[in-house]
Amino acid sequence: MNTTSRTVSAPEHSRPSRARLAIALCAVAASACSVGPRFARPAAPAQSVYTSTQEGDAAAGSVPAQFAQTLQLGASPSGDWWSAFRSSELDALVREAIARNQSLAAAQATLGEAEERVAAAAGARYPHVDLNAGAARQKYGAQFLGGFSLPPFTAFGLGPTVRYTLDYTGGIARSIEQRAALADYQRGQRDAAYLALTGGVVGQTIVIASTRAQIRAVNDLLAEDRDNAKLVQTAFDNGSVSRVDVLTAQSQLASDETLLPPLRQQLSAASNALAVLTGRSPAQFHTPQLDLGGINLPRALPVAVPSELVRRRPDILAAESQLHAATAAVGIATANLYPQLTLSASISQQALEPAHLFDAASNAWSMIASLTAPLYEGGTLRAERRAALAALDASSAHYRQTVLQSFGQVADALDALDHDAELLAAQSNALATAQASVELARESYSAGNSGVLAVLDAQRLRQQAQLGFVRAQAQQYLDTAQLFLALGGSPMAEAAAAATPPAAAPRG
């Protein structure tokens, strides 16, 4: 380390040399550069669709209009994506969850912490100024003074000290860049928490509404079973049916009664989960009395193109920020291989008595330039750089995998909606057929061509078809919400406007 130091009263002839030094330092600072790789945002994918059947889908047009949904290609979900379900009760629940959920509050606070750490790291760009004050009691030995002996004395000092590290390698700038990237990562985590929260509220609300509908359908089914059992028992008492028919009706009632407890448990679990999402304990929460009829299924679904998806999904943006931070870490590790140049200067008043502390003769100053260069550190610095490069490769692979997973989730949701529409159409046909069978069985029974068991069986099949239709309807609602989530429909995420007007494409 080469260090030059001078501490004397400042004579007039020293000022030009200090001016030249200042000019030289400015030139060094102006020529500063950053070592290591520079971050470049990954290019958006070139593909325009998510599935091989998205364009010209074979199911398009094969489903009745009341069950089909339409894709708006190139459009993006609105900030309050849940409003597409057009339910004031659902809107109120989501707003309450946003205001009260503690996981979201923690994510927001963590983001605030990360942003303040960026501000703290940015302070290294500027000179640091400290005020030093001190008083010391001293005595020099005679040997130090060439045989002379001085009595003990007290010295006083007061003045500022300035320290500045020249960032000619960009190590400080890369540290700030890394902190900023980590703050962006926390912003992505916050957005992901926001998206998970709103999606959870919508999902649990749909589960509650659909479970209530299923419970009603099962209760209707059980009522039919009880009527069947009574009628068969009456027929047995009249001698028109056998004991086997009585046991069959009773067995069917017992079997269908097992459908109700799991549904009640599902309703309780969904209600408790919704309570926690809205920041309340289950004991303080009143389950919303919502029906599927009060939640409107969105018929037009905005579907962002893949190139936009990677710019709006919180998990992809978080992975991109991790890649940015890993790139900056390589720059930091590279900068550590170079010498570090630090400048410091101080101006102070030094006197033996406080009364003379601010006299002109008490002025003192110093300027110090220190250079610290790594000579031998056992391979630590180069190993740390190789580790940073490996971490960069890992972050790059993680980013690519996150993008692939997101495309897979959108594809799954689109395919699921296709199948939901087909299933609803089939369940609707089954329900209509079962209803026609009931009417035919009743006519046949009235004409004396069939027994009461045929009517009872037809009624029971109709109730089972009704239950199946409710379940299929609920699944379409849930898969619609899942598509919004897969598209990153978070109001906190940045989303670019569609470059072209959305084109409607029918989808079954």
Image (spheres, rainbow, N blue to C red):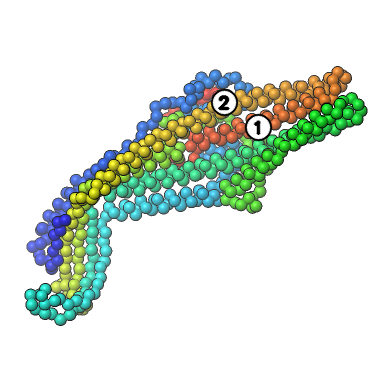
Q: Disc 1 on helix, strand or loop?
A: helix
Name which residue lies at 47% across and 49% down.
107
Q: Taking 28 as reference, is 296 above or below it?
A: above
Considering the image in quadrants, where does the N terminus appear? bottom left
Q: Element under label 2?
A: helix
Classify residue 442 by image quadrant.
top right
For the residue pair 448 and 208, the one nearer the viewer reads as 448
Which residue lies at the image location 20% right of the left edge and 50% below the top edge?
376
Q: Toward which corner of the image does residue 351 lie, by quadrant? A: bottom left
Q: Which mark is residue 153?
A: none
The residue where tag 2 is placed is 418
Q: Is residue 133 left or right of residue 310?
A: left
Crowding near pointer 2: few (<14 within 10 Å), some, many (20+)?
A: many
According to the picture, the residue beneath numbered tag 1 turns out to be 471
Sequence order check, earlier mark of 2 and 1: 2
Where does the image place residue 83, in percent across and percent down from the top left?
57, 38
Q: Is residue 65 visible?
A: no
Residue type indicated by callout 1: Arg
Give coordinates of residue 465: x percent, y percent: 71, 27
Count of all numbered marks drawn on residues in the image: 2
Q: Residue furthest right?
A: 238
Against 508, residue 84 (above or below) is: below
Residue 316 visible somewhere in the drawing: yes
Circle 1 crowding by C-alpha within 10 Å: few under 14, some 14–19, many from 20? some
Q: Position of residue 153 (x, y in %)?
A: 18, 79
CA distance separating discs 2 and 1: 16 Å
Q: Residue at 52% of width from left, 36% of height from top?
A: 485
